[in-house]
Image (cartoon, rainbow, N blue to C red):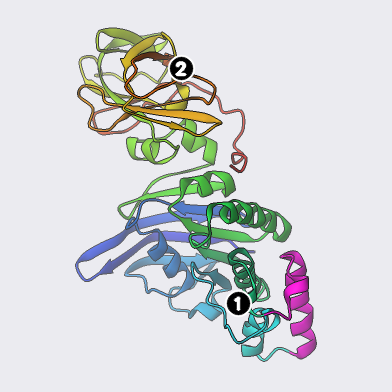
């Protein structure tokens, strides 16, 4: 099992509404990631699913059963927190075994389950050691092992990699993805890091100010964001937004003009757009050196050379945010040296005055998560 349904879930603290009517269905065996900026309600939503916070309104249903009034231990879930919360005086074996001892499980069952979890997590040789002798990644695996032995229907992860350094985070992303495939369990994972979301999720739930902004597969959110918030949040560096004016509709899509340059963006046309101010979106990685269907002359104020990529930031008239370009690492880009860059209309996104996207005319080749970075 492991099916979860959220039905118009609301959470308020006093007069402040944190979660504002969230509805979502999670299928058995899915890896779902809640992502969004700090304060968007993602951790609060996870804690309500776990039973650590009461709901103000709505229903939480696990495997067809309403669990709003059930304590955490009765919900068939196990939660892994940002902090490892290990007992420093206990061995790895005893830390993993702790929830089974609380349930007064037989010693033979405890040993069998702990050893099985340790094998899955590659902790076989560490069972007699104490947490102080382990690395951060190994400690987090012990915390995950403690969840595994409970054999929950749903695993809940609340930013479990935030305390790890960059290399360990990359390793643990791979470990968690492998673990999900091995166990086939439903997993719900909270993070503010959109790279974690893109590399691990079957579906991503993007939250903004207590609402769901969009739900979809990683590549769907990348290629077909439904609004400017999702377009700007998914992708690193963030999407560039340029103000344009709609000059008409044609068979190819919507015709717009930017700084005297006309282009037809291949999106679904909508009546009443002519003459309207719209927002053109172009991702930094879709910009190239040299002229394009839209050509810009920029002088980067900051250049970041990462080896694989070179990232440049420049100020453009009328834009509050920096205009960003991402080029291959072997292409020359220097601070304060003017260059010409361009991009194609086919790579552009278009948003109306309310920030809602006009649907792009593209077919996604794959809905699977992006490879781990």
Q: Is residue 143 left or right of residue 304?
A: right
Tell me the quadrant of the picture where the C terminus can be found: top right
Magenta span contains residue 109: yes
In percent of width and height, residue 78 lies at: 57, 72
Magenta highlight on residue 108: yes
Which quadrant of the structure image shows residue 27? bottom right
Relative vertical location of residue 214 with respect to residue 275 in this rendering, above or below? below
Residue 261 placement: quadrant: top left
User: As displayed, is residue 304 above or below residue 117?
Assistant: above
On the image, numbered disc 1 is attached to which residue? 132
- Whether residue 63 appears in this view of the structure is no
Give the x, y percent position of residue 43.
41, 63
Q: Residues within 10 Å of mark 1 (few under 14, many from 20)?
A: few
Give x and y (percent) for residue 322: 30, 30
Left or right for 361, reference 136: left
Q: Residues within 10 Å of mark 2 (few under 14, many from 20)?
A: some
* Structural distance between the alpha carbons of marks 1 and 2: 50 Å
Please state the total of marks drawn on the protein image: 2
What residue did someone put label 2 on?
Answer: 288
Q: Say which mark, if any, is on residue 354.
A: none
Q: Secondary structure at mark 1?
A: helix
User: Where does the magenta region start and end?
Assistant: 106-129
Q: Residue at x 64, y 64 (%)?
A: 1
Q: Tell me what residue is drawn at x 54 percent, y 69 percent.
A: 80
Q: Residue at x 35, y 28 (%)?
A: 240
Q: Nearer the viewer, residue 273 or 152?
A: 152
Say whether residue 156 is left or right of residue 45. right
> What SS does tag 2 mark?
strand
Closer-to-camera residue (139/282): 139
Left or right relative to 1: residue 41: left
């Amino acid at each position: 099992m492991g099916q979860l349904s959220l039905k118009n879930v609301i959470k308020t603290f006093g007069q402040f509404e944190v979660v504002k009517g969230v509805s979502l269905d999670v299928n058995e065996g899915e890896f779902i990631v809640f992502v969004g900026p700090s304060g968007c309600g993602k951790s609060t939503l996870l804690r309500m699913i776990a039973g650590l916070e009461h709901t103000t309104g709505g229903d939480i249903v696990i495997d067809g059963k309403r669990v709003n009034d059930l304590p955490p231990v009765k919900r068939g879930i196990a939660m892994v927190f940002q902090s490892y919360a290990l007992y420093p005086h206990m061995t790895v074996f005893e830390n993993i075994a702790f929830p089974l001892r609380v349930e007064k499980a037989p010693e033979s069952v405890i040993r069998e389950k702990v050893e099985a979890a340790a094998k899955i997590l590659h902790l076989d040789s560490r069972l007699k050691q104490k947490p102080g002798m382990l690395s951060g990644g190994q400690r987090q695996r012990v915390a995950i092992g403690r969840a595994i032995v409970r054999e929950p229907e749903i695993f809940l992860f609340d930013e479990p990699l935030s305390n790890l350094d960059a290399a360990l985070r990359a390793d643990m992303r791979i470990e968690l993805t492998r673990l999900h495939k091995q166990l086939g369990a439903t997993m719900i994972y909270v993070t503010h890091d959109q790279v974690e979301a893109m590399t691990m999720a079957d579906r991503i739930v993007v939250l903004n100010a207590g609402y769901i902004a969009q739900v979809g597969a990683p590549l769907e959110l990348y290629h077909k964001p439904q609004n400017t918030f999702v377009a700007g949040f998914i992708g690193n560096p963030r999407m560039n937004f340029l103000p344009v004016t709609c000059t008409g509709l044609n068979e190819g899509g919507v015709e717009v003009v930017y700084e005297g340059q006309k282009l037809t963006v291949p999106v679904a046309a909508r009546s009443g757009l002519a003459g309207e101010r719209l927002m053109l979106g172009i991702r930094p990685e879709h910009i190239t050196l040299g002229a394009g269907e839209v050509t810009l002359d920029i002088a980067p104020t900051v250049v970041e050379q990462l080896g694989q990529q070179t990232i440049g930031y420049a100020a453009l008239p009328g834009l509050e945010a920096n205009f960003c370009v991402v080029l291959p690492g072997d292409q020359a880009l220097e601070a304060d040296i003017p260059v010409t860059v361009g991009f194609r209309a086919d790579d552009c996104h278009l948003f109306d005055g309310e920030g809602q996207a006009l649907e792009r005319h593209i077919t996604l080749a794959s809905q699977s998560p992006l490879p781990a970075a």
